Amino acid sequence: MIEAVRLTKRYGKKPAVDDVSFTVRPGRITGFLGPNGAGKSTTLRMLLGLDHPDDGTALIAGQRYRDLRHPLRTVGALLDGAGPVPERRGIDHLVWMAQSNRIPRRRAHEVLELVGLTGAARQRVKGYSLGMGQRLGIAAALLGDPEILVLDEPVNGLDPDGIRWVRNFLREYAASGRTVLLSSHLMAETAGTADDAIVIAGGRIVAHGSLDDISAGHESLESAFFALTAERGGRGGW
Amino acid sequence: MNTVPTGRVPDTCEIKLSDLVRAEVTKIRALPATWVALALALTADALLGLLAATDVVRLAGHDGQIAIAQSGTVLLAPVYAFVAVPVFTAGGEYRGGQVRVSLLAVPDRNRFFLSKLLAILGVLAVAVLPVVLPGGVAQHALGDADAGEAVDALFTKAVAYLLLGLVAYGSAVLARTVVTPLAVLVVLPVLVSPLLRGLSPEVTRLLPHEATLSFLGMPEGPDLALDRPVGLSVVLAWAVLSIGAAWAVTARRDSCP
């Protein structure tokens, strides 16, 4: 379970995240939707203890992230702007992460196999394609076989096969009683994967509920999204 | 991608500081820049030791040619390849957003900083002797210093390298980059010291590089000389200040890569 309670973050006087509260329940995939600059990434960073909130609290399994005994066994995260040093080999990146959380070394090889990167394990990350980098990020998130997954745009750069794999994998993951928070701006992808959704715009939550509830009265999730975010200053076009 | 189910990771006991240090050492070892910097430092130190001992090459000075053995700044130059190791260790965290992954794995900022500090201290302590030994042996074998003096000089040099390494490490954490701390550390003795020396030698001799030269017994001139224990104290103070500031900043600031 993930709980955000009145989270607020300001950069200067401008609030990037303003009084944001929500709950992400286990056994379900929750989409976290919002236009660029809506506050999605900032919220995720506060949830995961990377950035300090100016106000409010974020709890993961009832604790602040930084108080977790085994962080990588509790939460697996794939975040924008969080990756390995490009000169390091993929396997080395996973090995140090495993060592830092007392995860057996063999697990690094298992997750590489899981995401289809075994052949590139000894390759330096700077030689990876965008999709391979994304797969390595997913492998890192799965390293501790965590109870909670927090993924920011996980299908970014993946080929259709990879996208389908992620979708099916997340469904199985949630079906086993675990928690998945999936940040995305791909409406069709979210509509095909998530059970619930949280919509953020202009740093504030504008909708929170099941996908059916949010889409009710609209042609699709996408239509609902544009209607909801337009009220908070979302862009109507390019 | 495969459809292999995720394998259950057995729960284990508390994560120890030694686990975190081991992970940090793996990070350092797995960075090619570490090995390049150490190889450069070793080669440069050995070559300068050889040149200083044989006096086959002389440098142009204000009062005619001087022996390399008389130029502390030149003899200390390899330290700037050596300190690249801690700089890459700390500054490298901010390449590719590594610091965010690190803090996801070790969210307790104090434990994160402490483990990283212990790891780099351990790596530097192990690496410093092989780096300074060939140059020291060359100077001893081909020069006129006795064995006791040579061992003392080696030990002093190793301590100087370690302390400057810590100064560099803290600077890289503060700067969140690799380039700036290395540039500043090189510019200080090459440009700032000569300019500042004419204005205020009292201040110049307190700079990290000049204090280190005093500690090594090789000050650039009588006006910049400190007693060796005072030189050691000054460079130690720089190291403590740099590490302390880096620790405070790591504990407080957001994870901007």
Image (cartoon, rainbow, N blue to C red):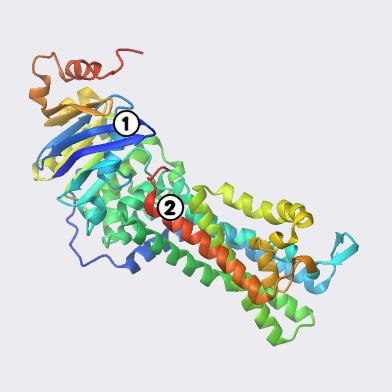
Depth check: give the residue in front, A10 or B213: A10
SS for callout 2? helix
Q: Is residue B210 above or below residue B143?
A: above
Please tell me how many numbered marks the rendered image carries: 2
Q: CA distance from mark 1 to mark 2?
A: 23 Å
Report x, y in % for residue A44: 27, 39
Task: Inspect the image, locate mark 2, and give the three-letter code of the amino acid beneath it.
Answer: Val
Report x, y in % for residue A17: 28, 33
Report x, y in % for residue A119: 36, 47
Tell me what residue is drawn at x 38 percent, y 65 percent.
B21
Circle 2 residues within 10 Å: few <14, some 14–19, many ≥20: some
- Examine the rendering and report whether any part of residue B215 can be seen: yes
Which residue is tagged 1?
Answer: A15
**What is the chain identity of the residue bearing mark 2?**
B
**What is the chain identity of the residue bearing mark 1?**
A
Circle 1 residues within 10 Å: few <14, some 14–19, many ≥20: some
Q: Is residue A189 above or below residue A111?
A: above
Task: Inspect the image, locate mark 1, and give the three-letter code of the amino acid beneath it.
Answer: Pro
